[in-house]
Amino acid sequence: MSSSSGVLKGCRALMAAAKAATPKSSAAKPKPKPKPKPKAVSKSSSSSKMARPTGILKLAPVSPALHQFLGVPEAARTDAVKKTWDYIKLHNLQNPTNKREICCDERLKTLFEGKDKVGFLEIGKLLSRHFVKTN
């Protein structure tokens, strides 16, 4: 037992010496912070803020059935899918045993070609038919 207490005394002595050798934070001078470099303004970043949405974010006219469901004459594809999912969750239309399956009510049947059940991955494909192409 005397040997273990001798080891601990040696550690304390080493720790005290190391503590005394480190500079205190109040004695150390703080380093000045480097000045931030000004960022170059690129034309693409300023024009992207004002750019119109494209692709699935672009507003497009919708079919009469989707217009009646959403209540707007034109919508983005992402908004249509989001509002459809909100309707599904609000009316609890997901199959409780298989959440990937949607049980359609009368309003959804008008959108999804009269199908009784739709897979959740089919929703985007079935809604895409309701967007009128304007070319």
Image (cartoon, helix red, strand yellow):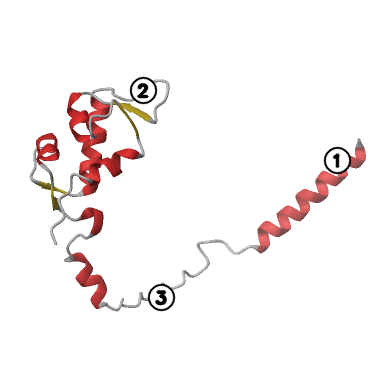
Residue 21 locus on image (x, y percent): 67, 63
**Counting other residues with Cα less than 10 Å from the Cα at mark 2, is it few (<14), some (14-19), or many (20 or more)?**
few
- Closer mark to the observer between disc 3 and disc 1: 3
Judging by the rendered image, the residue that carries numbered circle 1 is 5
The residue lying toward the viewer, choosing from 63 and 27, is 63
Front-lying residue, 74 or 45: 74
Q: Badge 1 local density, few (<14 within 10 Å), some, or many (20+)?
A: few
Q: Is residue 122 left or right of residue 15?
A: left
Kindly report which numbered mark, 3 or 2, lies closer to the viewer in this rendering: 2
Residue linked to disc 3: 34
User: Which quadrant is the N terminus positioned in?
Assistant: top right
Residue 64 location in percent, x, y? 9, 40
- Give the distance between the C-alpha atoms of the residues marked 1 and 2, in whole angstroms: 70 Å
Amino acid type, label 1: Ser
**Dot 3, how many residues are within 10 Å of its Cα: few (below 14), some (14-19), or many (20+)?**
few
| Up/down of 102 relative to 77, above or below | above
Dots 3 and 2: beta carbons under 8 Å? no
**Residue drawn at point x = 39 percent, y = 31 percent:** 100
Q: Earlier in the sequence, mark 3 or mark 1?
A: 1
| Separation of residues labelled 3 and 1 (CA atoms) | 50 Å
Residue 50 versus residue 93: which sits nearer the camera? 93
Type of the residue with mark 2 = Asn
CA distance for labels 3 and 2: 60 Å
Q: Which element is circle 1 on?
A: helix
Q: Identify residue for label 2.
A: 95
Q: Secondary structure at mark 2?
A: loop
Q: Position of residue 63 (x, y in %)?
A: 12, 43
Kind of residue indicated by mark 3: Pro
* 24 sits left or right of 11 in the view: left
Residue at the top extreme, as displayed:
96
